[in-house]
Image (cartoon, helix red, strand yellow):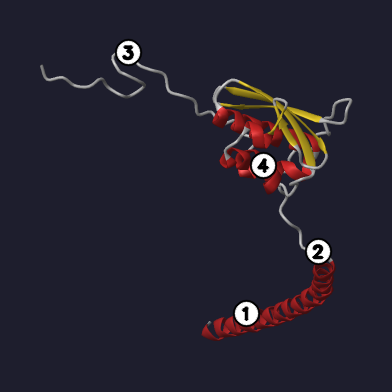
Amino acid sequence: MADNEKKGLADLGELTKKNEEPAAETKTEEKVEAKADDAPAADAEQADAETETPVEPAQPEAPLREQELDQYGRAYATGRRKDAIARVWIKPGSGQIIVNGRDQAVYFARPTLRLVINQPFEIADRKGQYDVIATVRGGGLSGQAGAVKHGISQALTRFEQPALRTTIKRAGFLTRDSRVVERKKYGRAKARRSFQFSKR
């Protein structure tokens, strides 16, 4: 009995060894074939990577607007600041700015106010390239200068649409400055100023 069992076990061991050897051979053959298949694919990928240009992430583009000109070839815009409202027309020219029928140096005598008006042209590198005609109402000189500046910025973007809009927008000139005078409160001298305190 013991001899028969030993023979049976020995036969089983030989069978398992024989079965394992072909399996190992097939595995190595599959690996070699896989490597051979991968090599051309890898070469093709490298060639594609060398020939392709790097792909940049898509950036949201500002919608392109058409140039808005009137029958005289001028761009029009309205500017506002505090209580002042300015109507502004620009057209290509020598850089002359006329406000309410007078030259800017006469109307805005303070140099700081003239600097404010010319800011959009300086940021856009268009100094001395456009003539400006503006009519302003309401507010004081400071508010009127801010309104003209706002109007010039808006008109520039309508005259030269895609090129200048982002530059002027980043500088913050297209946004209407919402700061206005705070209202007076009852029981106080002004918006926040209290009356003088009297002990008796």
Q: What's the distance in space between the residues labelled 2 and 1, CA to CA?
A: 62 Å
Q: Amino acid at mark 1?
A: Leu
Instruction: Give the mark nearest the N terminus, 2 or 1.
Output: 1
Q: Name the residue tied to disc 4.
A: 118
Q: What's the distance in space between the residues labelled 2 and 4, CA to CA?
A: 42 Å
* For discs 4 and 3, the disc positioned in front in the rendered view: 4
Q: Are marks 3 and 2 in contact (CB under 8 Å)?
A: no
Q: Quadrant of residue 43?
A: bottom right
> Does residue 37 sit above or below 182 in this rendering?
below
Q: Quadrant of residue 78?
A: top right
**Which residue: 66% across, 37% down?**
105
Give coordinates of residue 118: x percent, y percent: 66, 42
Q: Amino acid at mark 2?
A: Thr
Label 3 element class: loop
* For discs 4 and 1, the disc positioned in front in the rendered view: 4
Q: Farthest residue toward the front? A: 106
**Which residue: 12% across, 20% down?**
199
Q: Name the residue tied to disc 1.
A: 12
Label 4 element class: helix
Q: Farthest residue toward the top? A: 186
Instruction: Give the mark nearest the N terminus, 4 or 3.
Output: 4
User: Circle 3: is it few (<14), some (14-19), or many (20+) Cα within 10 Å?
Assistant: few
Q: What's the distance in space between the residues labelled 3 and 2, CA to CA?
A: 69 Å
Q: Name the residue tied to disc 2.
A: 53
> Does residue 198 sit above or below 177 in this rendering?
above
Q: Are marks 4 and 1 in contact (CB under 8 Å)?
A: no
Instruction: Give the mark nearest the N terminus, 3 or 2.
Output: 2
Position of 131 compared to 3: left or right? right
